[in-house]
Image (cartoon, rainbow, N blue to C red):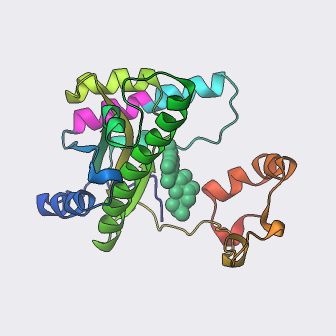
Amino acid sequence: MTVRAFDPDYEVPREHYELILDAARHGPSGANAQPWHYIVVTKPETKLKISEYFVAEQRRRARLKMKFPTPDYRGVGTAPGVIVVASDFRWVRAFPVLRDDDSPLNDMYKENAERILLQSVAASTMSAHLAAAALGYNVWWITAIGQQEAQEAMKPLLGIPEDLSVLDIMCFGPPKKAPYKRWKKRLDEIVNWDRFDPAHYWTEEQIEEWIRTRRHRVMYRDESNID
Ligand SMILES: Cc1cc2nc3c(=O)[nH]c(=O)nc-3n(C[C@H](O)[C@H](O)[C@H](O)COP(=O)(O)O)c2cc1C
Protein backbone atom coordinates (compact mmCIF):
# COMPACT_ATOMS: atom_id res chain seq x y z
CA MET A 1 0.00 0.00 0.00
CA THR A 2 1.35 3.37 -1.05
CA VAL A 3 1.89 6.02 1.58
CA ARG A 4 3.06 9.54 0.85
CA ALA A 5 4.14 10.66 4.33
CA PHE A 6 6.55 8.75 6.53
CA ASP A 7 7.86 8.86 10.09
CA PRO A 8 10.67 11.43 9.64
CA ASP A 9 12.63 10.25 12.69
CA TYR A 10 13.14 6.67 11.59
CA GLU A 11 16.57 5.67 10.29
CA VAL A 12 16.76 2.81 7.77
CA PRO A 13 19.56 0.40 8.72
CA ARG A 14 22.14 -0.11 6.01
CA GLU A 15 21.41 -3.86 5.80
CA HIS A 16 17.80 -3.07 4.92
CA TYR A 17 18.94 -0.98 1.93
CA GLU A 18 21.16 -3.89 0.94
CA LEU A 19 18.40 -6.50 1.28
CA ILE A 20 16.01 -4.32 -0.73
CA LEU A 21 18.53 -3.70 -3.49
CA ASP A 22 19.65 -7.32 -3.53
CA ALA A 23 16.04 -8.16 -4.40
CA ALA A 24 16.22 -5.53 -7.18
CA ARG A 25 19.50 -7.04 -8.39
CA HIS A 26 17.83 -10.42 -8.86
CA GLY A 27 15.00 -9.01 -10.98
CA PRO A 28 14.37 -10.51 -14.41
CA SER A 29 15.31 -8.48 -17.48
CA GLY A 30 15.17 -8.73 -21.27
CA ALA A 31 18.36 -10.41 -22.55
CA ASN A 32 19.43 -10.49 -18.88
CA ALA A 33 20.84 -7.03 -19.60
CA GLN A 34 20.01 -5.69 -16.10
CA PRO A 35 19.77 -2.12 -17.40
CA TRP A 36 19.42 -0.47 -13.99
CA HIS A 37 21.30 1.63 -11.48
CA TYR A 38 20.15 2.47 -7.96
CA ILE A 39 21.31 5.54 -6.04
CA VAL A 40 20.58 5.47 -2.32
CA VAL A 41 20.03 9.00 -1.06
CA THR A 42 20.91 9.28 2.61
CA LYS A 43 21.75 13.00 2.92
CA PRO A 44 18.78 14.99 4.26
CA GLU A 45 19.74 18.07 2.21
CA THR A 46 19.71 16.03 -1.02
CA LYS A 47 16.29 14.53 -0.20
CA LEU A 48 15.03 18.03 0.43
CA LYS A 49 16.36 19.30 -2.89
CA ILE A 50 14.69 16.43 -4.76
CA SER A 51 11.41 17.15 -3.01
CA GLU A 52 11.75 20.85 -3.92
CA TYR A 53 11.91 19.99 -7.65
CA PHE A 54 8.77 17.96 -7.26
CA VAL A 55 6.91 20.65 -5.37
CA ALA A 56 7.92 23.25 -7.99
CA GLU A 57 6.80 20.98 -10.83
CA GLN A 58 3.51 20.35 -9.06
CA ARG A 59 2.91 24.12 -8.86
CA ARG A 60 3.70 24.49 -12.55
CA ARG A 61 1.23 21.75 -13.45
CA ALA A 62 -1.43 23.48 -11.39
CA ARG A 63 -0.73 26.71 -13.33
CA LEU A 64 -0.93 24.79 -16.61
CA LYS A 65 -4.33 23.46 -15.48
CA MET A 66 -3.39 19.85 -16.11
CA LYS A 67 -6.05 18.85 -13.61
CA PHE A 68 -4.07 15.88 -12.40
CA PRO A 69 -4.71 15.32 -8.71
CA THR A 70 -1.17 15.71 -7.40
CA PRO A 71 -0.06 14.60 -3.96
CA ASP A 72 2.03 16.52 -1.45
CA TYR A 73 5.59 15.87 -2.57
CA ARG A 74 7.09 17.37 0.58
CA GLY A 75 6.89 13.79 1.93
CA VAL A 76 9.91 12.92 -0.24
CA GLY A 77 12.08 15.33 1.78
CA THR A 78 11.42 13.49 5.05
CA ALA A 79 11.16 9.91 3.78
CA PRO A 80 13.57 7.66 5.74
CA GLY A 81 14.38 5.62 2.61
CA VAL A 82 14.93 7.31 -0.75
CA ILE A 83 16.31 5.40 -3.72
CA VAL A 84 16.64 6.91 -7.20
CA VAL A 85 16.17 4.45 -10.05
CA ALA A 86 18.13 5.18 -13.22
CA SER A 87 18.52 3.41 -16.52
CA ASP A 88 20.70 3.65 -19.57
CA PHE A 89 18.74 3.58 -22.80
CA ARG A 90 21.83 2.51 -24.74
CA TRP A 91 20.91 -0.97 -23.49
CA VAL A 92 18.08 -1.08 -26.05
CA ARG A 93 20.78 -2.38 -28.37
CA ALA A 94 20.83 -5.59 -26.33
CA PHE A 95 17.29 -6.35 -27.53
CA PRO A 96 16.16 -7.33 -31.05
CA VAL A 97 16.87 -4.23 -33.14
CA LEU A 98 18.26 -3.70 -36.63
CA ARG A 99 21.57 -2.17 -35.68
CA ASP A 100 22.78 1.02 -37.39
CA ASP A 101 19.58 1.36 -39.32
CA ASP A 102 17.15 4.27 -39.02
CA SER A 103 14.42 2.90 -41.27
CA PRO A 104 10.75 3.02 -40.20
CA LEU A 105 10.98 -0.75 -39.76
CA ASN A 106 13.71 -0.33 -37.22
CA ASP A 107 11.69 2.38 -35.43
CA MET A 108 9.11 -0.30 -34.74
CA TYR A 109 11.70 -2.64 -33.25
CA LYS A 110 13.31 0.19 -31.33
CA GLU A 111 10.00 1.11 -29.76
CA ASN A 112 9.58 -2.45 -28.61
CA ALA A 113 13.16 -2.50 -27.30
CA GLU A 114 12.40 0.60 -25.21
CA ARG A 115 9.37 -1.19 -23.83
CA ILE A 116 11.52 -4.17 -22.89
CA LEU A 117 13.95 -1.85 -21.11
CA LEU A 118 11.19 -0.11 -19.15
CA GLN A 119 9.53 -3.41 -18.24
CA SER A 120 12.88 -4.75 -17.05
CA VAL A 121 13.56 -1.78 -14.79
CA ALA A 122 9.97 -1.95 -13.48
CA ALA A 123 10.39 -5.66 -12.69
CA SER A 124 13.56 -4.95 -10.72
CA THR A 125 12.00 -1.94 -8.98
CA MET A 126 8.93 -3.98 -8.04
CA SER A 127 11.21 -6.60 -6.48
CA ALA A 128 12.70 -3.80 -4.37
CA HIS A 129 9.22 -2.61 -3.36
CA LEU A 130 8.17 -6.13 -2.37
CA ALA A 131 11.35 -6.59 -0.34
CA ALA A 132 10.70 -3.28 1.44
CA ALA A 133 7.12 -4.37 2.15
CA ALA A 134 8.39 -7.74 3.45
CA LEU A 135 10.60 -5.79 5.88
CA GLY A 136 7.44 -4.07 7.16
CA TYR A 137 7.83 -0.74 5.38
CA ASN A 138 5.32 1.17 3.32
CA VAL A 139 6.42 2.39 -0.08
CA TRP A 140 5.88 5.24 -2.52
CA TRP A 141 6.62 4.79 -6.21
CA ILE A 142 7.13 8.09 -8.04
CA THR A 143 7.52 8.10 -11.82
CA ALA A 144 5.27 10.95 -12.80
CA ILE A 145 7.84 13.69 -12.28
CA GLY A 146 10.40 12.54 -14.80
CA GLN A 147 10.29 15.12 -17.52
CA GLN A 148 13.48 16.43 -19.03
CA GLU A 149 13.89 19.43 -16.72
CA ALA A 150 13.56 17.39 -13.53
CA GLN A 151 16.09 14.94 -14.91
CA GLU A 152 18.53 17.71 -15.69
CA ALA A 153 18.11 19.13 -12.20
CA MET A 154 18.53 15.80 -10.46
CA LYS A 155 21.44 14.31 -12.37
CA PRO A 156 24.18 16.73 -11.21
CA LEU A 157 22.86 16.57 -7.67
CA LEU A 158 23.54 12.84 -7.64
CA GLY A 159 26.49 12.72 -10.03
CA ILE A 160 24.45 10.73 -12.56
CA PRO A 161 26.11 10.70 -16.02
CA GLU A 162 24.35 12.45 -18.91
CA ASP A 163 23.68 9.19 -20.76
CA LEU A 164 21.52 7.82 -17.98
CA SER A 165 17.86 8.60 -17.39
CA VAL A 166 16.26 8.98 -13.99
CA LEU A 167 13.20 6.74 -14.26
CA ASP A 168 11.70 6.95 -10.84
CA ILE A 169 12.14 7.41 -7.14
CA MET A 170 11.33 4.85 -4.50
CA CYS A 171 10.55 6.16 -1.03
CA PHE A 172 9.90 3.89 1.92
CA GLY A 173 9.69 3.82 5.69
CA PRO A 174 7.25 3.46 8.52
CA PRO A 175 4.10 5.44 7.69
CA LYS A 176 3.29 8.68 9.50
CA LYS A 177 -0.41 7.77 9.66
CA ALA A 178 -2.19 4.43 9.28
CA PRO A 179 -2.08 3.41 5.59
CA TYR A 180 -5.29 2.65 3.74
CA LYS A 181 -6.19 0.30 0.95
CA ARG A 182 -7.20 1.89 -2.33
CA TRP A 183 -9.83 0.78 -4.80
CA LYS A 184 -8.80 -2.06 -7.06
CA LYS A 185 -10.68 -3.53 -9.98
CA ARG A 186 -12.33 -6.85 -9.11
CA LEU A 187 -10.59 -10.04 -10.18
CA ASP A 188 -13.39 -10.98 -12.58
CA GLU A 189 -13.05 -7.56 -14.24
CA ILE A 190 -9.45 -8.11 -15.25
CA VAL A 191 -9.18 -11.86 -15.74
CA ASN A 192 -10.18 -13.48 -19.02
CA TRP A 193 -10.36 -17.20 -19.61
CA ASP A 194 -9.14 -18.39 -23.01
CA ARG A 195 -10.53 -15.37 -24.86
CA PHE A 196 -10.77 -11.69 -24.05
CA ASP A 197 -14.21 -11.01 -22.65
CA PRO A 198 -15.72 -8.12 -24.68
CA ALA A 199 -17.56 -6.96 -21.54
CA HIS A 200 -14.14 -6.02 -20.17
CA TYR A 201 -13.44 -3.56 -22.98
CA TRP A 202 -13.58 0.07 -21.90
CA THR A 203 -14.72 2.57 -24.50
CA GLU A 204 -12.99 5.93 -24.74
CA GLU A 205 -16.08 7.59 -23.24
CA GLN A 206 -15.95 5.23 -20.25
CA ILE A 207 -12.28 5.98 -19.69
CA GLU A 208 -12.91 9.74 -19.90
CA GLU A 209 -15.80 9.40 -17.48
CA TRP A 210 -13.62 7.44 -15.05
CA ILE A 211 -10.93 10.12 -15.22
CA ARG A 212 -13.48 12.86 -14.64
CA THR A 213 -15.46 11.29 -11.82
CA ARG A 214 -13.39 8.53 -10.20
CA ARG A 215 -9.67 9.12 -10.60
CA HIS A 216 -9.22 11.64 -7.80
CA ARG A 217 -11.17 9.39 -5.45
CA VAL A 218 -9.35 6.16 -6.13
CA MET A 219 -5.97 7.86 -5.82
CA TYR A 220 -6.35 9.46 -2.43
CA ARG A 221 -9.17 7.70 -0.61
CA ASP A 222 -9.78 4.47 1.20
CA GLU A 223 -11.64 2.00 -1.04
CA SER A 224 -14.49 1.84 1.47
CA ASN A 225 -14.94 5.60 1.23
CA ILE A 226 -14.83 6.57 -2.43
CA ASP A 227 -18.45 7.43 -3.19
C1 LIG B 1 4.62 3.32 -12.63
C2 LIG B 1 4.08 4.01 -11.42
C3 LIG B 1 4.20 5.38 -11.33
C4 LIG B 1 3.73 6.06 -10.21
N1 LIG B 1 3.98 7.40 -10.10
C5 LIG B 1 3.57 8.05 -9.00
C6 LIG B 1 3.92 9.42 -8.84
O1 LIG B 1 4.60 10.01 -9.67
N2 LIG B 1 3.46 10.05 -7.75
C7 LIG B 1 2.73 9.42 -6.78
O2 LIG B 1 2.38 10.04 -5.79
N3 LIG B 1 2.41 8.10 -6.89
C8 LIG B 1 2.83 7.40 -7.98
N4 LIG B 1 2.56 6.06 -8.08
C9 LIG B 1 1.80 5.39 -7.02
C10 LIG B 1 0.36 5.15 -7.46
O3 LIG B 1 -0.37 6.36 -7.45
C11 LIG B 1 -0.31 4.11 -6.53
O4 LIG B 1 0.39 2.89 -6.64
C12 LIG B 1 -1.77 3.88 -6.91
O5 LIG B 1 -2.54 5.03 -6.65
C13 LIG B 1 -2.39 2.67 -6.19
O6 LIG B 1 -2.25 2.77 -4.80
P1 LIG B 1 -1.61 1.58 -3.96
O7 LIG B 1 -0.16 1.49 -4.34
O8 LIG B 1 -1.81 1.98 -2.52
O9 LIG B 1 -2.37 0.35 -4.31
C14 LIG B 1 3.05 5.35 -9.17
C15 LIG B 1 2.93 3.96 -9.28
C16 LIG B 1 3.46 3.30 -10.38
C17 LIG B 1 3.38 1.79 -10.44
Residue 205 horizontal side relative to residue 71, left or right: right
Q: Residue at x 33, y 63 (%)?
A: 127
Between 37 and 180, the one lying in front of the other is: 37
* Residue 99 locus on image (x, y percent): 37, 29
Q: Is residue 77 visible?
A: yes
Q: What residue do we see at 47% from left, 60% from top?
A: 2
Farthest residue toward the left?
A: 14
Residue 68 position, x and y percent, is 66, 38
Q: Would you identify the image quadrant in which residue 135 lies?
A: bottom left
Q: Is residue 176 left or right of residue 39?
A: right
Judge from the rendering whether residue 206 lies leftward or rightward of residue 225; answer left or right: right
Image point 43% across, 20% down: which residue?
Answer: 149
Could you tell me which residue is drawn at 31 percent across and 39 percent down?
Answer: 86
Q: Residue 41 location, x and y as percent?
A: 22, 42
| Magenta stretch, residue numbers | 44-53
Q: Nearer the viewer, residue 209 or 2?
A: 209
Does residue 48 show up magenta in the picture?
yes
Is the magenta region chiefly helix, strand or loop? helix
Task: Say whether residue 41 is left or right of residue 177.
Answer: left
In the picture shown, does residue 212 fall above or below 155?
Answer: below
Q: Can residue 174 be seen by looking at this rendering?
A: no
- Identify the image quadrant of the C terminus: bottom right
Residue 196 spot, x, y in % from top left: 74, 69
- The correct choice, above or below, for 71 with respect to 192 in the image is above
Q: Is residue 51 magenta?
A: yes
Tally of numbered tags? 0
